[in-house]
Amino acid sequence: MKIITPHYIMLRDRVVTNLSVAFDKKIQKIAPFEELIEEFEGAEVTTLREHSLLMPGLINAHVHIEFSGNKTELSYGDFLNWLYSVIENRADLINECGLECMAEAIGKMLANGITTFGAISSHAMDLEACEKAKQNVVFFNELVGSQATMADALFSDFLARVDASKTVKREGFYPAVAIHSPYSVHPILVKKAVEIAKNENLKLTAHFMESIAEREWLDEDKGDFKEFFEKLLSQDQSVNSAEEFLSYFEGSDALLTHVTNANKNEIATIAKNNYTVIHCPISNRLLGNPTLNIKELNENKIRWIVATDGLSSNYDLDLFEEMKISLFMHSSAPLLEFAQALLDGVTVHAAEALGLNTGVIEEGKNADMIVVDLEAEPTAELPIHLILHRYNISKVFINGKIEKGAL
């Protein structure tokens, strides 16, 4: 048992002082230090510096670890140009980012206070790195393939990767399923993969309505994707409509990434089925896509969370930076209210979306916590200050074990 006494603790709805936290793998009790040391005699005690803030560890629900070698290889500014550059450089990016490269990206996330991440794995090249990661990992085995003639081979490969991820037995590792997108996965494959996720109670995610090209291709079989599919796959029409694709997920609590080009009917479907939307503002800007309409999501009571996407469409895996960019992107949103929503989107709401017992400093929750070194007493505007000033993170705890800093 450990007892930690920070200057301040960020609870679900307020910041408190003069309290300590007793924890092992889970948070056992939050109370005055004298009460805890009497109840948990012999506990390891840590008293933190003035203005230290204990808060929930951050959760990055959508990241592509396999592409962590990119810095200047890919083309930004337009989604199709970026996609062509990914295809052109895919082999080099994957081959040149081995275990050490992926471990470095995972380590940067740890240093940035990310205690849980959702890895979107296209090839399982990142399985070993994720198995060795100190963080909790939801390992989304991704299914891609729009050609019916390749369906059996693609599904066999997908199943093999799912089975391989199930062999990882370490604490905090959760196999899961990802469907790439409505334009890139044949409906036969979507249905079979979703059935597996539902039957085995695996988390389920997909990219959805990221680009204008996707919108035009799914609706009218035209636009920038028309040449792309005809040239590379000899396809002259889309394999799914957007509504059909969404319907396959009914009965699940799916997470949909981007959703920057969804129409009102699709938003209504997302709301009706309680799907979660993952907001990746830096990725959307770099790939020339619209800004997510968070006001519309709020009006429809759709839960949204924040993630970095991968280094193929970002320059860092830092959720504080991601929140800062979003804070400025959504310039009409009430500043303090939106800052709090962003913090919830990388803590408690992200935990709920992934079905994990974490994301908040609360008795019974997993002890995934970070210590942020503030410079003064926090005010009511703490959410804004945390995002703007990127304070030092001096300690990181994952399942009660210290992974950064020292006791």
Image: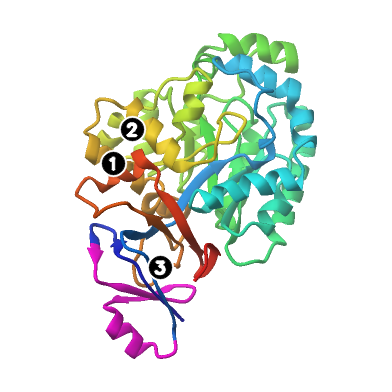
Q: Can the viewer see residue 399? A: yes
Q: Disc 3 on helix, strand or loop?
A: loop
Q: Which residue is mark 3?
A: 365
Q: Which residue is mark 1?
A: 384
Q: Residue at x 39, y 27 (%)?
A: 292
Q: Is residue 28 above or below residue 101?
A: below
Mark 3 to mark 1 CA distance (whole Å): 25 Å
On the image, the x and y values in percent for residue 204 come to 54, 46
On the image, the x and y values in percent for residue 322 come to 44, 36
Within-10-Å neighbours for mark 3: few <14, some 14–19, many 20+: some
User: Is 37 inside the magenta-drawn segment?
Assistant: yes
Q: Amino acid at mark 2?
A: Leu
Q: Amino acid at mark 3?
A: Lys
Mark 2 to mark 1 CA distance (whole Å): 9 Å
Mark 3 or mark 2: whose residue is earlier in sequence: 2
Left or right: 198 as drawn, with respect to 271: right
Q: Residue at x 44, y 37 (%)?
A: 321
On the image, the x and y values in percent for residue 186 come to 65, 30
